[in-house]
Image: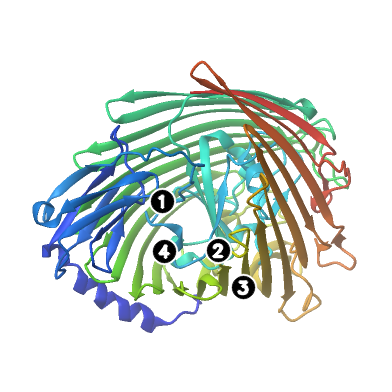
Amino acid sequence: MTPRFNLTLFIGIVPLLSALWGQGAGDFISGRVTDEGGTGVPYANIYLENESGGTTSDRDGRFLLATEGVSGSRVIIAHSAFAPDTLDLRTVEGKAIEIKLERRTYRFAPVVIYGNLYGKESLQLPVSHRAIDFGSAPSSGVGIGEKVDRFGIQLRDYGGPAGLKTVSSPTGYSEHILILLDGFDLNSPQNGVFDLSSLPVEFFAQGELYPGQGSSLYGSHAVGGTVNLLPARPGNFLKVRSGSLGDRGVSGETSLRLGKSHLSFYGNQFESEGNYRQNNKFDQNAVGAKLRAPDVGGWNFSSHLIATQTERGIPGSLTYPSPKAHKENDEFLAILTGRTISRFGHTELMAGAVSSDELFANPDWAMESRHQVRNWQTRFLHRFESASRFTNTLSLELARTDVKSDNAGDQAVTKGAAGLLSQLSFGKSVTLSPSARVDWDDHSRSTVLTANMALLWSPAAGPVQSATISSGTSYRAPTFNDLFWEDPSGYTKGNPDLEPEEGVSTNLSVNLKPVMGDVVQGAVTAAHYAVDNLIQWVPDESWVYSPQNVLKSESTVLGLTASLTPASLPFKITVGVETTESQVLTEGANRGKQLLYVPPSSQWTDIQLKLGKVRGHLSYRNLNRRRYSYGDGAFLDPFQRLDASVSVDLPLRGFAVAIEGGARNVLDDRELQSVYDYPEPGRTIFVTVGLSR
């Protein structure tokens, strides 16, 4: 069985793509927008005077503007941080040019630009999004999981720095959240999740959460949402950190400029005793490199490499402790991306590889298990540009995964995919975005078809600033453990006949215009998820456990956020509330029960204070009573946590000194449990001193 979707959507837009393939012969202007130093200016506006059409530069500053059939005589280049420039169309038409913009003389707070793997502004993708600025507030520990957990996103935490940390889905499964690094799939082919404690946060600048169906854009796992992590630009800094539970570490990056290119080297060492419970030590070493080459034969190249070596204790739960179990992970990730613009449009090529070696050992059980995963991915993206308001982006992907596992055996799967994202604008206020994708692998030898239709409305008048509604299908392919697991004791086994999990969902997001002089702003969200073929490990008549497609579920989510930014006071308050009604649809004893780890209601508050060079931050979240098992009375108590931090920036002879400190779990609640029987530590404090240039 394959996910349900409207085949006529896919059939209807493919001929339109074919019709646009040959539009490169039309008139055009292409080039690159840079600052005085030659650095690309992302998302500058390029348009023709007295014409309604236009374009924006991509993340590298490159652009392509179709001019066929237009009557305007001047090209305008504008950006909020730079003085605008004007060119005569007759002198630049049909040429590739470089435009240098001069920075404006006034100063203002920095504006964060969020990108994505399609090289478009997030608002132009057919799903709403939540932006995450990792530099907006300090946090304890060194993993990126603590940063993600601060912005109203529910993190499933198995306790302390050593505990597994995954993003929780409204569908009840962390495997339903796809984690990307600049478009590179990070979810483990072996178990389906990605541990956010394994990546050092300083390597990254920001991220984006796209809720809901996303397989028509990104592939497997994007049932409940997608998180895309974006690496920071090369820089120069040195940080030393310390804190409770024996937390201590040092990290740094040094950057070299080679002509217009930048090359940097990153390093990090962090350890935590985690002594609030036995066997909770965490030790990590990481090295990385970043390369940005802005112009190599008309291409912009960027490369990211990161290698981590992690050793951690696995303390187990309170009921089932494991005082000697430990796990070692060696991870290596390399991505090379090239982007260019020609008369045919925007082109991106990506090639990447991830290597993961894991050793799990438990001397108490005389148990040792090794797993090696090698994953290669390549992707081709091309966005066709035209003078009309209709654009198409074609994606082609190829991947291969090799696994050598003590429990899943030696396995290899090759996967391929082809997708199409279209955008059709009606005037200045309405954009229609259909997308469709075909995935195939040589294990199941079957295709999975997913599709999505989205509508973006930005009215010129009225209380609504923008509204996005998207509806479509998604899927999650079975993991290697699901398919090939081999337990030497004979108590569990894999199931090679599993079908993909199927999701159908609809997401609505409405952003309201600011009121009271831009002081108050709000947004309303709503979503519905229905998932079939959920995989669950169940026993047969001989009490041998194996995964089966046995569950169905649905969830309805309603959310409200509001922000208050008084013009005369140096702080911003953001509050949010979300209610979720979920249930199991499958016939049997569990029918009608709430999904595991999905809170029926949650609330969070974010307070940011800025007074001169001092910044303060308070973050509060409350997850109400949640079910952790389908047994009777199997509920977790409400999860309440308050975090506080403060930072100050001090100039020092051409350098900037940043001092950050704070406390995690200020309420000192020592009974916090994010998942079944896994406690979190009480109040912990941290301090970081950084030097940058």
Q: Amino acid at mark 1?
A: Arg
Q: Amino acid at mark 3?
A: Ala
- Mark found first going from the N terminus, 3 or 4: 4
**Element type where label 3 sits in the image:** strand
- The residue pinned by badge 4 equals 124
**Element type where label 2 sits in the image:** loop
Name the one closer to the observer, 251 or 419. Answer: 251
**Element type where label 4 sits in the image:** helix
Tell me the crowding category of disc 1: few under 14, some 14 to 19, or many 20 or more residues within 10 angstroms, Cα based.
some
- Mark found first going from the N terminus, 2 or 1: 1
Label 2 – label 1 distance at C-alpha: 18 Å
Q: Amino acid at mark 4?
A: Gln
Camera-side mark, 4 or 1: 4
- Mark found first going from the N terminus, 2 or 4: 4
Q: Position of residue 65 (x, y in %)?
A: 22, 59
* Labels 3 and 4 touching (C-beta < 8 A): no
Residue farthest toward the top in the current orientation of the protein = 653
Label 3 – label 4 distance at C-alpha: 20 Å
Residue at 37% of width from left, 37% of height from top? Answer: 303
- The residue pinned by badge 1 equals 400
Q: Quadrant of residue 585?
A: bottom right
- The residue pinned by badge 3 equals 527
Q: Quadrant of residue 537?
A: bottom right
Q: Position of residue 25 (x, y in %)?
A: 11, 64
Camera-side mark, 2 or 4: 4
Drawn side of residue 617 relative to residue 266, left or right: right
- The residue pinned by badge 2 equals 496
Drawn side of residue 412 relative to residue 32, left or right: right
Q: Amino acid at mark 2?
A: Pro
Question: In the picture shown, does residue 235 fall above or below 677?
Answer: above
